[in-house]
Image: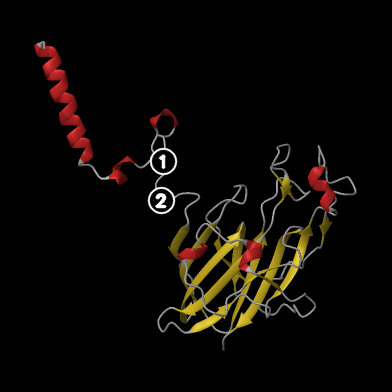
Amino acid sequence: MKLSAILTSKFAVTVAVALAAVPAAAFAQKPPPPPGGKAPPPRGVQGQDLNESTISSAGAHRILGGVWVDNWFKLYINGSPLLEDSVSIRTERSFNAERFEFNADLPMTIAFEFRDFMENDTGLEYIGTRRQQMGDGGAIAQFHDAASGRFLAATGSDWRCLTVQSAPADRSCESDRKPDVSSASCAQTVTPAPANWMAPDFDDSSWPAATVHSAGDVSPKGGYDRITWNGSARLIWGQDLEMDNILYCRVTVGG
């Protein structure tokens, strides 16, 4: 046998022995590298599961809040804007949770603007693709005293929610090749809300009670499990998870 053949045979045996000593898990399939060799975005940027923040605000009580929404929210405390979702409403599938600390006085009026993603006023998403559909919403929030851990409030049927934009008028709009809000099936319903709807002294007694929805119906994801929810916290929305796209929800707690 030639020397080159002998060396090749010995090399093959050595490689086989080395491979046999490597755990099988080492050969688990790995995701391909990103296009252009660019590294994936670091945590802490748009689309992360959980965004944590400390907010400078006035008040005698330090409060810890937690929110998960499909897709976007803006929060007002005692009539003043406090926090906006860290992921833009223009982001499809912008599932994420927010955990934050702030100061406020009690009693405390909590007011949310909730929005589901929609490409236009028809309420549809993925328009013009095979995935064209009505999106569905859902929201859950809770508040605790940061120092003592005392539970203060959580979303539930005691909240009042006014749907200010609903669409499409008929589910058949989902199959329209060119859905347009001017057509009967794709029309929207808009309900004007008072400019001071988030204020503590606003009378919300005429607003409907929030509708509680199951986790099975909402399918919360992307940060929902990163927060330990109080046993009384419920997923809420309007009556229709798909047609109700923009809601104002509020409650007053504490004393």
Q: Residue 113's quadrant in the figure?
A: bottom right
Question: Is 247 left, or right, of 187 in this rendering?
Answer: left
Q: Residue 40 has which mark? A: 1
SS class of the residue under badge 2? Answer: loop
> Up-down: is 8 above or below 13?
above
> Up-down: is 77 above or below 221?
below
Q: How many marks?
A: 2
- The picture places residue 249, in percent across and down from the top left corner, at 68, 70
| Kind of residue at badge 1 | Pro
Q: Quadrant of the C terminus?
A: bottom right
- The picture places residue 98, in percent across and down from the top left corner, at 50, 63
Neighbor class of circle 2 (other Cα within 10 Å; few <14, some 14-19, many 20+) is: few
Q: Residue furthest left?
A: 3
What is the spatial separation of the Cα atoms under label 2 and label 1, in whole angstroms?
Answer: 9 Å
- The picture places residue 110, in percent across and down from the top left corner, at 61, 74
SS class of the residue under badge 1? Answer: loop
In this figure, which residue is indicated by the disc labeled 2? 43
Q: Residue furthest front?
A: 1
Q: Residue 202's quadrant in the figure?
A: bottom right
Q: Residue 192 has which mark? A: none
| Kind of residue at badge 2 | Arg
Residue 154 visible within the image: yes
- The picture places residue 248, in percent across and down from the top left corner, at 70, 67
Q: Quadrant of the N terminus?
A: top left
Residue 199 visible within the image: no
Comparing 127 with 77, the one in front is 127
Q: Residue 13's quadrant in the figure?
A: top left
Residue at point 53%, 82% (across, down): 152
Q: Residue furthest bottom?
A: 255
Question: Is 20 left, or right, of 189 in this rendering?
Answer: left
